[in-house]
Amino acid sequence: MPSPRSGHRLSAPLLEREPELAAAARAVDALTGPDATGGLLVYRGEAGIGKTSLLAEIGRRAADRCTVLSGRGGETVTSVPFHVVRQLLVPALLPLPEERLRRLFGDRFDITAPALGLAPPTAPLADPQGVRDGLDRVVARLAEQQREQPLVVLVDDAHWADAESLLWLAEFAGRLPGLPLLIVLAHRADPPAEPTATLLRHVDERARLTVTLRALTEDATADLARAALGDRTDDPFCREVWQVTGGNPYETVELLATVRDRMLEPVARSARLLRGLGASARGSGLVARLERLGTAATRFAWAAAVLGTDIPRRLAATLAGMSPDEAADCVARLREARIVTGSDPLEFTHPLVATAVYRSIPPAVRTALHGRAAWAVTLEGLGAAAASRHLLEVHPDDDPDVVGQLREAAREHLAVGAPDAARRCLERALQEPPPPDAYAEVLYELGCAALLTSPAATVRHLRSALDLPGLDPALRADATCRLGQALAHSNQLREASVTVAAEAARTPPGRARTRLEAAHFMYESFRAAEDDPHGRSRRLAALADHLPGADDAERALLSLRAFDAMLRGEDTALVHDLCDRALLDGSPAPGVGWTDTEWGFETPAMIGIAYAFTDRPDRARDLFEEAVRAYEISGWSGAHLAFAHTLLGLAHRRAGDLPRAESFLREGLRLADRAGRGLAVQWDAVCLLVDTLLARGRTGEARELADRYAFGPPWPSAMVLPDGPCVRGRLLLAEGRTREAVAELEAAGRALEARGRHNGIWAPWACDLARALAADAPDRAARLADLARAHAERSGSGTALGEALRCAALFAAPDEARALLARAVHHLEASPSAYEHALARHDHGVALGSRTELSRAAALATACGADTLAARAHRALSDLPAQ
């Protein structure tokens, strides 16, 4: 008969997992050597199927030659942001000297370290994408520094991982093949509801190998039974063990341990008892086992279950109302009963045990324990964010202190880049509810917290806040401006414009009103269609033309005016003067703020765009390079950084450096894709990239890009940078789809002329339409060329004049055409537009039959990266008769 060894979990062999262990061994082998490559392995299966044991064995085998980091999710801590990431990284980072730690983080220390709890936040708001990028950098550098002991990262119970950690893992997994780093992740095959299920699917898709673990066979179960109970264990007994447990390893081990504890003979006559004993390993049976230990042990286990994972013994004792000696006795009994393991901190022996204990707590008691836990955590000095997960479980009770704690927790979550956690806290605060005089403020805070992740929720909450009394004038203005942003991001530009205009009309003169008026002008400017474009432009000119740019409000108005004047094709010198005043005499940084949360990034963006489309791409480049630096330093790695790279691509496109433009635009599009589909920055990046690819002669790539992103109607409510229909018309022309191109360009021309937008570089519809109609309707085409020339002469832009003259030459007699092309070359040579200059040189060289001009055109086109144009110039050279 087996001897009783009550309280010790069986040391069971890991059976029927040889293929899974072999796959892990191969992945570990791949981490070493000069061509080290990492990856992701995913093991999934039902609860108790052996995922934890498998990961532990992988870690044990890798430990002799690798650095093993481990973390696990927990059912009661899914609301704690970065919980799993902290488990993984903090033990490895905390012992490092501060100097080495800062080198490891680089310029992302102030952004990323607070999310790991390694430093206090330095700003009230952290961009979640910036935090994730910072984590990427830290882990990548850590992996590179550990090549002698490569990193193996084990993540267990990923189905209970917090959303912030899981989202980082899903994104980071794509980088693993290029790093000496292996992540081994385990999760249940039937994960909980969204968004966890979606994130786990994304993780699985990036895995080198995904394995669904199967139950043990009857033979393996028999081997396990004989290893635990001795060789006298007979076949009928083993068969019944397998039938009772279904081959589930956890339930098998627990059942065998119970058999051993009860000192049952492992033979056929005992088999009839196994079904009843098996029930004690889970659910109500496990709860009954706990209750037999007594009320003190049960109370301590309840306290531990409420605290979750990494359970501090002292905190559990406080929550259970016990002395240290009483707690030590309870821990000993719970360990003997295979319910907890460890000493300090404590853990439950298995997630199934933790779940069963937590769910066995009577609801009223559980709620009370969470309330006590919140205050115990607070008294320990762990902060409002740590207490908030317990407050989320407490019933509303009209307690202003709870509201205050939840609001403070929301601020702490926002400061480390966890807006969803902040949103949960503020939603719970509203249920408390807040005092009447603070209700609108909490709604305002909730709207702001949701801005990055849910514009629709932001609209709902901010509208509610504005409908209530209690917001002071400054907050009302800020709430309205943020509401306008959310509406604009939701493709509701007209509603954004109307909203800020209505609030401006109610606001007394002063800074707040000026900010609202500026927002109204901006949204009207950005709309693809508006009710009174000419009246708005006149009002804006009257308001801004005389301003010196003395403060942020004046600079915002000047930037709007400069942007509008650029679009309308007004005098280029006026546009530059307006931009210079908005920038405090043209300096690249002072006077504008890319990370300014009050006036927004639009102020410097509009200045740079106005410069770019009026022959000052150098000024635009300086501004946009500053934007990239500012966003990288501040950790704004989402749509803002995407827009900065896109704008930098615009500056290089306008300067004629097509390869560099393409590089920045592709990076901008990559970053925009991470931020979400259908955003304004994605439209801009695609539009500019299509235009750049066409300039490089890569029409097929431009078409593939346009199709992939559905670049075309229906167009968004906001304008596209540059004019989207014009660029699409140019693409259709390049493909030889002339009839479709004519229809697209005619519609674009009607819309642009109606709004008075005559900048032929922003919207080159007239010249392109003239070329499309040249063969079939030459008279109409010539009139369009004349219209483009008139607009260009009004603006005085060298690029616009050169392009208009080049177009006009198509409809002139040969001698006049050569003269027009000579003038086009003159204007474009003096402009920064190297690509357009190469085009004019090519046309002029062909018209003259000049080897010199064509050679210069080929050299210019090559320098620009316009390989197709360079080839055309070389062919034209070869077609000339020998001299």
Image (tube, grey):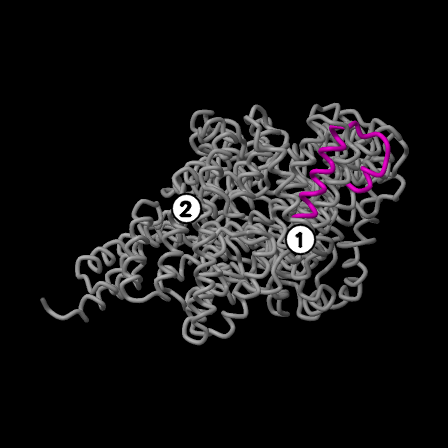
Question: In the figure, is residue 567 to the left or right of 695?
Answer: right
Q: Residues within 10 Å of mark 2 (few under 14, many from 20)?
A: many
Which residue shows up at 83% across the image and 26% down it? 401
Q: Position of residue 748 (x, y in %)?
A: 55, 61
Amino acid at circle 1 = Asn
Frontmost residue, 271 versus 41: 41
Which residue shows up at 49% across the image and 26% down it? 584
As for residue 478 lying within the magenta part, the answer is yes
As for residue 386 lying within the magenta part, the answer is no
**Reading the chain from its start, which is encountered first: label 1 or label 2?**
1
Frontmost residue, 135 versus 95: 135
Amino acid at circle 2 = Ser
Residue receiving disc 1: 491
Res. 18 visible in picture: no
Q: Which residues are magenta?
A: 462-488
Question: In the figure, is residue 285 to the left or right of 848?
Answer: right
Circle on res. 678: none
Q: Position of residue 239 (x, y in %)?
A: 69, 70
